[in-house]
Amino acid sequence: MNELLVVVGDALLDVDLVGTATRLTPDAPVPVVEDVQIRERPGGAALAAVIAAAATAREVVLVAPIADDDGAARLRALLAGRVRLIGIPATGGTAVKQRVRVGDHSIVRIDSGDPIAVLGELPAEASAVIRSAAAVLVADYGRGTTADPAVRAALSAARGPVVWDPHPRGADPVPRTRLVTPNGAEAARVAAAAGVDATGSGLAAVGARAEALIRHWGVGAVAVTLGSRGALLSYGEGAPMMVPAVPVTGGDPCGAGDSFATAAALALADGAVTGEAVAAAVAAASAFVGRGGASTWDTVTPTSAAPAGGVEALLERVRAAGGTVVATGGCFDLLHAGHVATLRAARGLGDCLVVCINSDDSVRRLKGPSRPLVSAPDRARVLEALEFVDAVVVFDEGTPAEVLERLRPDVWAKGGDYAGADLPEAAVLRRWGGQAVVLPYLDGHSTTALVERSRV
């Protein structure tokens, strides 16, 4: 089996000029940006490639026009050791996007360069990797790469599934592309050009546009990404599938579309059906935005990583903003109203809530061989679905002391059935100035009681 994931498209160099602003210039109502730090990262198809490389053990190959200039040299250096680059000769200079930012806010963007591929035919190495790849992601940024007949011929000959992330100025996907991932605005624009009258932003209008795009392009499926709403997947007939997004507080949406398309391509490469791939893509894009978006491109975050990686990024953001981290813990086997009341109250004590749950082996040691009734992954999914739970961590020890040492929350909250008791976690919290507290308990609710009643 071929282990390659190939990304084809337009490689850009993104530059963030990040500083502070406390005053306006005397000659115009614009901020004076000072103490500027320069941060460079791959952009466009190059960003999609490094996101993929951080999320998979597969080799990732980027096929893109590369000019011969300083910008290209800087881009190659950023990709080195992460992605194998097969460059297509190009003229016109490397495309560079510069954002001037104050904190998390962009003030202005300056674009330069316009690489134009010099092609009679695609390099043999590029054609070979596209044809044999486990999956191909087309990251179209409207620079003309995907309109070239040689590139389109290679994509049409790909044996693996093709995912196409389109651009308003880009080419139509090649027929029989497995999945196309336009955002809402792109889908509306193309559908209108195809003569489809589907005004409005409701799901009915989005679904009608997706069906029209499938017919217009001759592709297998269209997933319209809708930002914080998630994504709507249509196969052109029947009811579409709506995949809601996990709510994200803050974060930078720059690069979310690349993250979505990349995750979908990786899932298809691993044998997922299209619906599974879109569900994985929505989850990956939400996590990507929550981690800080494209600015975290060089942070290795494999999709198989333990939840702690995401939790630690969450805690870093909350603490950087001067917030309070709250944690609670338990088995949470058969989530009931008492749990919900305690979790909601715990979240009200700070700016994020991390729930530490016992692993299946840990539950068995505590509750007996007949427990848990629900596996740890499923218990975590149920808890993560609650709007007042920000993250879940599974621990295998008999007590959460070790995971608390790692997370170091400001507050550790337990249900009121511990009122007056000496919480063993209290001594752990005191090591870094944290506080253990007991919350009011909703009487008459316990998992053990529920299990006993079910046996009657």
Image: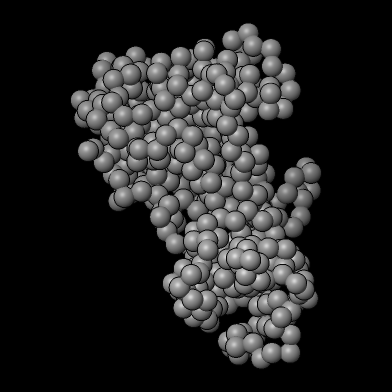
Where residue 404 appears, as percent x and y from the top left, is 55, 78
Depth check, front residue: 327 or 185:
327
Determine which quarter of the picture holds residue 149. top left
Q: Is residue 376 above or below residue 59?
A: below
Where residue 355 appears, as percent x and y from the top left, is 60, 67
Where residue 229 appears, as percent x and y from the top left, is 66, 39
Depth check, front residue: 128 or 40:
128
Q: Is residue 451 above or below residue 71?
A: below
Image quadrant holding the C terminus, namely bottom right
The residue located at (45%, 32%) in the rendering is 274
Determine which quarter of the picture holds residue 242. top right
Depth check, front residue: 149 or 216:
216
The residue located at (48%, 70%) in the rendering is 370
Q: Is residue 292 above or below residue 189?
A: below
Residue 444, can we see it?
yes
* 120 with respect to 142 (left or right): left
Image quadrant holding the N terminus, namely top left
* 303 with respect to 313 (left or right): left
Tell me how many marks there are. 0
The residue located at (47%, 38%) in the rendering is 276
